[in-house]
Image: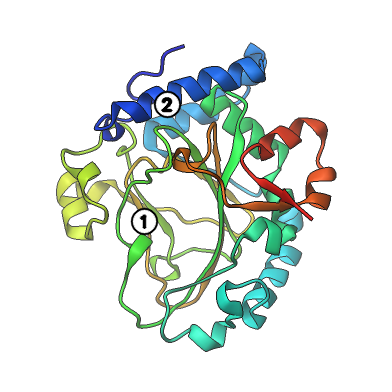
Amino acid sequence: MKWQQPQVRLAFQRDPRSIDAFQQAWEQRNKQYPMSEEDINQFSHIVDQIEDKGFTIIPGLFTDIIDEFADNMYKRFDEGQGTVNSERSEDIRNRNNHQLIKNPLYNAPEIAPFVFNEYVFRIAMSYLKCYPAVGTLNLRRSFANDVPVEGVQYYHIDPNSPRFIKFFVYLNDVDELEHGPFTYMEGSNRKIAPGVDQVHRLKDSLAEDLYGKDKVTPIYAKKGDLIIADTTGLHKGSKCKTRDRIMLTINYGIHSEEFRPQNFDIRKDTYDNLPAHLKYTCDFLNIKE
């Protein structure tokens, strides 16, 4: 199989070496982990939805475990357990937009049932047509405050790979624009406007001029729903205005992020407890005691 448009996005053709590296990684991984047609096509209906708009939502996937998990994560953030510089929420609420759990699979191993969920894994497999592996992870609290927007709160495309897939789980309901929803420019996964790949961050006005205001899609969901997106399309995290938002982000791909040495860790006991077939999804993680 040769990856062609729209699967490998126009935005990344500025560097043919990236396309070649992706193709080689895809061929090598398929040789290492052969798959059946059933594996590849099991979730083709979901893949079609993502290809069409750039995103989709699976309601209620984690409803049975989300409440306890969310409570534990709020406590971690409040008390600074595993956060960057061990900062508590109240220490930085009025001067930062975000608070992060550093190296989240190691410092917050409670996320493992989400990261290594069989449904998530098999959707990634169908989307990539290859045995997927975990890339980066992000566990972020976004504050409702008056700090100006910055970073990922501007529209951008992700440079991680010519093709990879992201999964998002809200840890609280996000029902309104003031709650800071993940926002996607519908259809931008299929067509990158000229010059977008050369700009790191885009203001709302420019993004809307390029694609049209009617394509702006705030993604509202309940806590425990699974949001899936192709983030080689244009997207952002909207600013929280009336309440905080906590979100878990999981990347699945077929090579290490940006083809660089991986710097995310997994605890050995977490790894040892995985089913044999899911251990292969840790190929780009460092296993540590």
Q: What amino acid is labelled 2 in the image? A: Ala
Residue carrying label 2: 21
Could you say which disc has been placed on residue 160 in the image?
none
Judge whether residue 211 can be spotted in this image: no
Residue carrying label 1: 236
> Image point 24% across, 32% down: which residue?
14
Return the disc, 1 or 2, that comes first in the chain's sequence.
2
Q: Please state which of residues 266 and 125 is positioned toward the viewer in this rendering.
A: 266
Q: Please state which of residues 213 and 286 is positioned toward the viewer in this rendering.
A: 286
**Residue 128 x, y percent position in the rendering:** 52, 27
> Image point 16% across, 54% down: which residue?
206
Q: What amino acid is labelled 1 in the image? A: Lys
Q: Please state which of residues 24 and 152 is positioned toward the viewer in this rendering.
A: 24
Identify the colour scheme used: rainbow
**Residue 22 x, y percent position in the rendering:** 44, 26
Question: As drawn, is 270 to the left or to the right of 11?
Answer: right
Which image quarter is the C terminus in? bottom right
Q: Circle 2 — which element?
A: helix
- Report the Cα–Cα distance between label 1 and label 2: 27 Å
Badge nearest the viewer, 1 or 2: 2
> Image point 70% across, 56% down: which residue?
111
Is 253 placed above or below 1 here? below
